[in-house]
Image: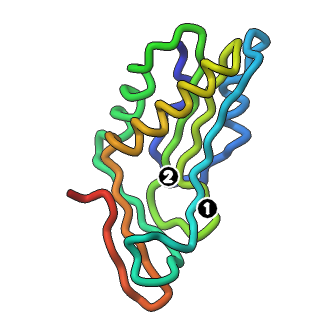
Amino acid sequence: MTVSIAAVTAAPLDFAAHMAAVSDEANGAVASFAGVVRNHDPGASGEVERLDYSAHPDAEARLRELAAQLDAPGVAIAVSHRIGTLAVGDLAIVVCVASAHRADAFAVCRDLVELVKRELPVWKRQHTVDGATNWVGIV
């Protein structure tokens, strides 16, 4: 397995760069996930207008560890999570996983997204149009 990209960044995420990072003549499948900021959330008091993501200083190293712990020979991974202020429609996370066959790509992509959601030390503060805020992911 190869982890080409594992980044926690304030820069806008480039989906095409993630696809390119896992491209190889040996790979016949690429499964991807793009998490997009939406205008609603069950925990928000009203319509969401933006999110502020913050992360632990070790979040990027932890993201690389999470990607590397997936035991998937012959799989290439590119994953990034955004921090900072994001508007509705912005990409919050991009995961691209390539392999020779689709089953491996789908499985690893899903497993990585679920691992990141559960274990990456990143938190978001939702801002609604009425001025209310709430934190998500802080226990």
In the rendered image, the vertical position of residue 69 relative to residue 6, given as above or below: above
How far from the left and from the top, in percent, is residue 28? 77, 17
Instruction: Kindly identify which numbered label has been placed on residue 56.
Output: none
Q: Secondary structure at mark 1?
A: loop
User: What residue do we see at 73% from left, 22% from top?
Assistant: 29
User: What residue do we see at 57% from left, 67% from top?
Assistant: 38
Contact between marks 1 and 2 (CB within 8 A): the answer is yes
- Image quarter of residue 63: top left
- Image quarter of residue 124: bottom left
User: What residue do we see at 45% from left, 56% from top?
Assistant: 83
Q: Quadrant of the C terminus?
A: bottom left
Q: Secondary structure at mark 2?
A: strand
- Image quarter of residue 62: top left
Cα distance between the residues tagged 1 and 2: 9 Å
In the rendered image, the vertical position of residue 43 relative to residue 54, given as above or below: below
Residue 66 located left or right of residue 90: left
How far from the left and from the top, in percent, is residue 118? 34, 43
Instruction: Kindly identify which numbered label has been placed on residue 82.
Output: 2
Residue 110 located left or right of residue 90: left
Instruction: Kindly identify which numbered label has been placed on residue 90.
Output: 1
Of 82 and 31, which appears nearest the observer?
31
Q: Mark 1 or 2 closer to N-term?
A: 2
Residue 29 located left or right of residue 73: right
Of 115 and 107, which appears nearest the observer?
107
Q: Amino acid at mark 1?
A: Asp
Residue 55 located left or right of residue 20: left
User: What residue do we see at 52% from left, 22% from top?
Assistant: 3
* Residue, far left: 139
Q: Residues within 10 Å of mark 2 (few under 14, many from 20)?
A: many
How far from the left and from the top, in percent, is residue 82? 49, 52
Q: Amino acid at mark 2?
A: Arg
